[in-house]
Structure formats: structure tokens, C-alpha cells
Image: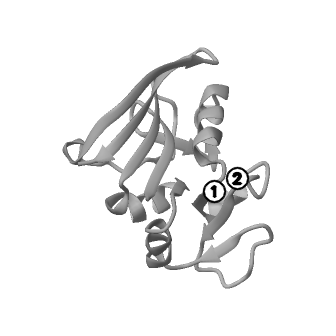
Amino acid sequence: MLKLIACVTSDGGLGKDNKLLVKMDEDMEHFKRKTIGHTVVMGRKTWESLSRKPLPNRRNIVMTNQPESIPGAETVNSIEDIIGLSKKEDVFIIGGAEIYSLFLEHAQVLEMTEVDGVFPADTFFPEFDNSKFKVTHCTDVEGSNLYGVFKTYEKI
């Protein structure tokens, strides 16, 4: 199953200067719980932004047009390869914005941490049609002087 997982602010902000906009321990734990033992797919910039590479206990795949190999990760340049893989196992798209845009229409599940507030951002989660999804899980989360919700959207 293809799943997107992201932490966004009220205006859909994801990041600035290749860094997350919001760092909440609760969100990091949520991300880890959801993705551990699964395949995670990211763009090259997201890979470069990771403080720990590869993400442990996960199969790391980087989507890139660059021909060189990336130590600790597999590389692919075809969305069809990832879509095919997601028919056999859970695959989490973890960013960035361009990669989310490529896979949004194919995703069956969106795992979103929605944080109240707007922060200066240069990267945004793509807009999606809420009518094509239903919220199947919603839990309040508070931490680091921030408030938000964990929401699971499933394609209808």
C-alpha cells in the first residue's frame, strides 16, 4: 500500500532551507512508529537533510535522476517502480514536496501531523481534494509549545 507521511503547518508548510519547519518529539516518535520495518521513499534533498543516514530499520530508497549510487540507500528514477513495490508491501513516501506531488494521486493513505500555526516556509505539501479521502483516525498531540493532530486519511 502506498502511504504519504508528513508534518505540515496550518498553511501546508513543510520546510524551509531544506529543514523541517516544526520539530516535535511526538511527531518524530509517530513517524518512527509508522515507518519502522517498512520501505521509505524520499527525494535526494530529503536524503541530504537527514541527520542520520540511512534511517535505521527501514529500507531507504532515494528517487533521483542522478546516476551515482548513494551509500546506505537504493536509488530509483521511476515512479512506476515504487507503485509496483507498493502493491506488495507498505511503502511510505516521506518527502520532499516534489516527491509528494508525484505520488499523491496514487496514495491510498495520508498520515498527517497537522500543526496549528504558520511559520515562514519555502516548501509546501501539495493541495489535495479532501472529498477523495475520509479521516479514519484523529488524535490530538501537544508538545514543544505546539498543538496539532495526528490524522489518517484513507482514499474513498
Residue annotated with mark 1: 46
Residue ID at (35%, 41%): 153
**Would you say the residues marked 1 and 2 are in contact, meaning their CB atoms lie under 8 Å apart?**
yes
Residue ID at (56%, 43%): 15
Residue ID at (57%, 43%): 34
Picture coordinates of residue 48 (x, y %)? 71, 59
- Amino acid at the residue labelled 1: Thr
Residue ID at (40%, 37%): 152
Picture coordinates of residue 10 (x, y %)? 40, 30
**Could you tell me which secondary element the residue under label 2 belongs to?**
helix
Q: Residue furthest bottom?
A: 67
Q: How many marks?
A: 2
- Amino acid at the residue labelled 2: Ser
Picture coordinates of residue 65 (x, y %)? 58, 79
Picture coordinates of residue 91 (x, y %)? 52, 59
Closer to us: 4 or 91:
91
Q: Residue furthest front?
A: 88
CA distance separating discs 1 and 2: 5 Å
* Vertical position of residue 92 compared to residue 76: above or below: above
Closer to us: 138 or 88:
88
State how the image is colored: one colour
Circle 2 packing at 10 Å, graded few (<14), some (14-19), many (20+), is few
* Vertical position of residue 50 compared to residue 42: above or below: above
Residue annotated with mark 2: 49
Q: Residue furthest left?
A: 131
- Tell me: 139 left or right of 64: left
Residue 150 image label: none
- Tell me: 27 left or right of 137: right
Circle 1 packing at 10 Å, graded few (<14), some (14-19), many (20+), is some
For the N terminus, the image quarter is bottom left
**Could you tell me which secondary element the residue under label 1 belongs to?**
helix
